[in-house]
Image (spheres, coloured by chain):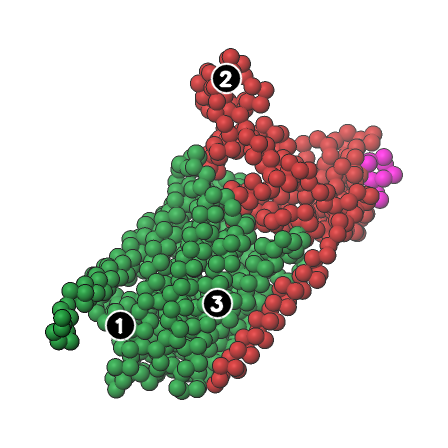
């Protein structure tokens, strides 16, 4: 470190290496990514957004929504699940007794406590989650034993993690999900909930619009600020309500002759939010979708 | 450290050569700091009264928070750091500042860039990438201005009489190179006509954020501290070997942190970051030992002068850097990610570490380069007290609230509203800290502005007296 050149050289090598690793490397590995095929399907993932939703991403960026919301779901692992879809000729009580008699089978011995607990808290509604855990042998043994007695089951692989348990997604987010996002808005703070699957959780356009205009009217005690700029408050024309006007609940409605109409920006933003539904199983993030089982 | 009593004439000449460029850099920086903290307060108000800015989108959290963070980093920290770097390089070279007009022009271009960038964010033209929110035109202005200052700084460094580089030289010279490379690279990729596809954008933004908020701040902050601490303590920098070790490990390991654990990217990226983060503990400890041994024995004083600023800043560096590293270890990340904890760590790095050291350095340099005492010394002391209290009250609740929020987010049986509600009380308490920081930043602004006004008035009266002075040279013959 005696001369300027040696300091320059050290810095050049250090920063150059990290640039090569974290800028050039990902560019080569991920910069050429293409659409991928959804597992057990011929559909491609992700789909290009419509024009309105693409513009909606720009409204999302413009309002800095990513300051409070993330668009990335994390997963800590995966588990096997066995759902009972129909009981065949059994009734619920019969089935509980029958199941408990099966648990002496060696493959099921280690998981018997979980299965008994699941049976005990079961209220008779189907589908019943008979087993949920890491033991893949228990799932196949159960399915094998139940098949001959006419009980229809579904063995599934499910993602595990606090985000998944909150219902924010069915699998972790992966690089492929953001192929068509420009700019990518991953977010780094959850002052509000994750939005990766908001299009599945709240698919109603009116709910979304009401939530933007007055968050408290659909989510009591919400800390989200209202975005009145995205709406036009105007006088009703000849006392008639416009078909676009927001159906504001009591306590939030303005005067009798006033109405609240979403602007184009609000519609674009909602169109974008409704496209957020990372629910397709991929090679790098597999799971068994519920729809495929039925 | 060889500029002491015997060459005071030279030192005052060097200080005078820095006067105009440094006033241009510090004046704007102090103003941006006040505005940045004000905008930060506006952003925080969203969590006191969510509908406060319902009709004013430009002050909503999404706009104001980004603008506030960028104002503190690009408005205050970088120009202030550039000013201090110019002065330290001139002092270490024992030579007046080279090309002094260049940094004056650069300071004005820089401040114009910050103005354009801030207005753009508030009007909704943010790029959407964290720490790179300024649009292309502002980024070009900032880069051009930085290059101009860097040219003057490197030229001044080249005039040094003693060819051997002092530890501050390594850190500060590296800081110049770091910004030029990372800022240009990130902006060229992200703001070009054809940005890279998908998540690569986020990876480049993380790489930049880490290199800016962690490595750059550490290089510049520690570089300045290694120059000022020995001067204040009146003894040479301790353990230069540790300093070399700290410098090299910081630039080789620290620069690989930044990719959050569990990010939706190939697993090798966050794994590399986690590994590098663990190794980064080494430079933090090494640099802490150097600073500690240098200061040790200098006595504990509560004079609230520049020494106190730099000491507090150095302590903040050690603690905030360790907390930053903890965010990348997988166990820590699971709880701390996406919470107010990371916000708290970043704000600690900005205000508690870089902000403190730079403010201390400004108070040290200002009287020397203007050749007169601070106009409002009491306000400078008040500045220290408010900054220490402000940073603590601002950051500690964010850290505790963030940790609490993280624990609750990990437990799916706790409703999301309860998890974010857990942090809300802490968040509201932290606003008091921001108010104190605002008060402190006003003290700095007043000191810089009053000093500038006094200097300008002096210049004016000097010019007037020159104009009014009777012509000498004998009688005018008809």
- Span shown in magenta: A142-152
At mark 1, the secondary structure is helix
Give the residue drawn at x 36%, y 51%. Answer: B35
Question: Percent position (x, y) of residue B24?
Answer: 34, 62
Q: Residue at x 53, y 25 (%)?
A: A261
Alpha carbon of mark 3 to alpha carbon of mark 2: how far? 58 Å
Chain of the residue displaying label 1:
B
Q: Circle 3 sits on which residue?
A: B147
Total residue callouts: 3
Which residue carries the number 2 mark? A236
Residue A114 drawn above or below residue B307: above
B6 displayed left or right of A135: left
* Residues flagged by tags 3 and 2 on a common chain: no
Q: Give the labeled residue for mark 1.
A: B368
Task: Residue B208 in the image: state x and y as whole percent.
Answer: 55, 61
Quarter of the picture containing the C terminus of chain B is bottom left
User: In the figure, B164 relative to B76: above or below?
Assistant: below
Chain name for mark 3: B
Is residue B83 positioned above or below B428 on the image?
Answer: below
Residue furthest toward the left? B475
Whole-percent x and y of residue B109?
43, 59
Chain B representation colour: green
Residue closest to the eye, B34 or B109:
B109
For the residues beneath circles 3 and 1, the answer to whether they share a chain is yes
Q: Residue furthest right?
A: A148
| Labels 3, 2: front one | 3
Q: Residue at x 31, y 69 (%)?
A: B19
């Amino acid at each position: 470190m005696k001369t300027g050149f040696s300091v320059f050289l050290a810095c050049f090598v250090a920063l150059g290496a990290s640039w090569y690793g974290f800028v050039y490397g990902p560019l080569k590995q991920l910069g050429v990514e293409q659409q991928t095929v959804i597992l057990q399907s011929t559909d491609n993932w992700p789909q290009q957004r419509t024009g309105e939703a693409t513009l909606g991403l720009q409204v999302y960026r413009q309002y800095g929504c990513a300051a409070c919301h993330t668009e990335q779901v994390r997963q800590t692992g995966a588990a096997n699940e066995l759902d009972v879809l129909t009981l065949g000729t059994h009734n619920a009580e019969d089935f509980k007794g029958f199941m408990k008699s099966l648990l002496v089978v060696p493959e099921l011995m280690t998981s018997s406590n979980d299965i008994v607990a699941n049976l005990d808290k079961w209220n008779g509604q189907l589908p019943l989650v008979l087993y949920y855990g890491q033991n893949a042998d228990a799932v196949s043994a159960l399915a094998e034993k139940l098949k001959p007695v006419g009980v229809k089951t579904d063995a599934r692989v499910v993602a595990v993690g606090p985000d998944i348990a909150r219902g924010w997604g069915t699998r972790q987010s992966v690089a492929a999900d953001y192929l068509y996002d420009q700019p990518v808005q991953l977010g780094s703070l959850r002052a509000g909930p994750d939005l990766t699957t908001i299009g599945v959780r709240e698919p109603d356009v009116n709910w979304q619009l009401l939530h933007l205009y007055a968050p408290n009217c659909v989510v009591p005690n919400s800390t989200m600020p209202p975005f009145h700029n995205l709406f036009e408050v105007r006088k009703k024309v000849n006392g008639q309500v416009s078909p676009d006007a927001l159906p504001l609940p009591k306590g939030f409605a303005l005067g009798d002759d006033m109405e609240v109409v979403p602007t184009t920006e609000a519609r674009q933003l909602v169109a974008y939010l409704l496209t957020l539904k990372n629910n397709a199983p991929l090679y790098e993030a597999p799971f068994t979708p519920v729809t495929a089982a039925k | 450290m060889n500029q002491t009593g015997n060459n005071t004439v030279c030192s005052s000449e060097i200080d005078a050569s820095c006067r105009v460029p440094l006033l241009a850099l510090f004046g704007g920086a102090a103003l941006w700091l006040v505005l940045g903290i004000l905008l930060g307060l506006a952003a925080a108000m969203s969590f006191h009264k969510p509908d406060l800015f319902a009709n004013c989108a430009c002050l909503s959290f999404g706009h104001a928070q980004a603008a506030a963070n960028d104002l503190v980093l690009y408005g205050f920290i970088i120009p202030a750091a550039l000013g201090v770097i110019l002065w330290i390089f001139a002092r270490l070279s024992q030579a007046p500042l080279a090309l002094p007009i260049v940094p004056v022009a650069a300071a004005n271009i820089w401040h114009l860039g910050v103005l354009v960038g801030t207005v753009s964010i508030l009007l909704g033209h943010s790029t959407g990438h964290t720490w790179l929110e300024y649009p292309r035109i502002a980024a070009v202005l900032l880069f051009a201005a930085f290059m101009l200052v860097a040219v003057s700084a490197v030229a001044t460094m080249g005039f040094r009489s003693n060819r051997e580089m002092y530890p501050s030289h390594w850190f500060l010279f590296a800081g110049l190179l770091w910004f030029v490379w990372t800022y240009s690279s990130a902006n060229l990729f992200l703001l070009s006509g054809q940005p890279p596809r998908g998540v690569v954008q986020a990876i480049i933004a993380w790489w930049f954020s880490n290199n800016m908020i962690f490595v750059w701040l550490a290089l510049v902050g520690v570089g300045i501290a290694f120059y000022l601490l020995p001067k204040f303590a009146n003894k040479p920098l301790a353990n230069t070997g540790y300093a070399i070790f700290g410098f090299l490990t910081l630039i080789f390991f620290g620069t690989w942190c930044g990719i959050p654990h569990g990010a939706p990217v190939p697993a090798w990226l966050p794994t590399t970051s986690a590994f590098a983060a663990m190794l980064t503990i080494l430079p933090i400890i090494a640099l802490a030992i150097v600073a500690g041994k240098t200061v040790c024995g200098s006595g504990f004083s509560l004079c609230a002068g520049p020494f106190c600023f730099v000491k507090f800043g150095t302590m903040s560096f050690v603690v905030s850097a360790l907390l930053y590293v903890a965010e990348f270890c997988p166990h820590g990340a699971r709880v701390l990610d996406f919470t107010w904890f990371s916000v708290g760590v970043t704000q600690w790095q900005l205000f508690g570490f870089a902000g403190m050291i730079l403010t201390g350095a400004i108070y040290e340099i200002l009287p020397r380069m203007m050749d007169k005492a601070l106009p409002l010394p009491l306000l400078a002391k008040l500045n220290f007290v408010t900054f220490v209290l402000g940073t603590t009250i601002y950051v500690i609740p964010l850290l505790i609230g963030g940790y609490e929020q993280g624990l609750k987010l990990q437990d799916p049986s706790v409703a999301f509203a309860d998890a974010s509600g857990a942090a809300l009380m802490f968040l509201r308490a932290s606003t008091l800290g921001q108010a104190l920081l605002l008060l402190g930043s006003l003290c700095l602004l007043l000191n810089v502005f009053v000093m500038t006004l006094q200097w300008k008035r002096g210049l004016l009266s000097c010019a007037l007296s020159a104009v009014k002075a009777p012509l000498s040279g004998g009688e005018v013959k008809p």
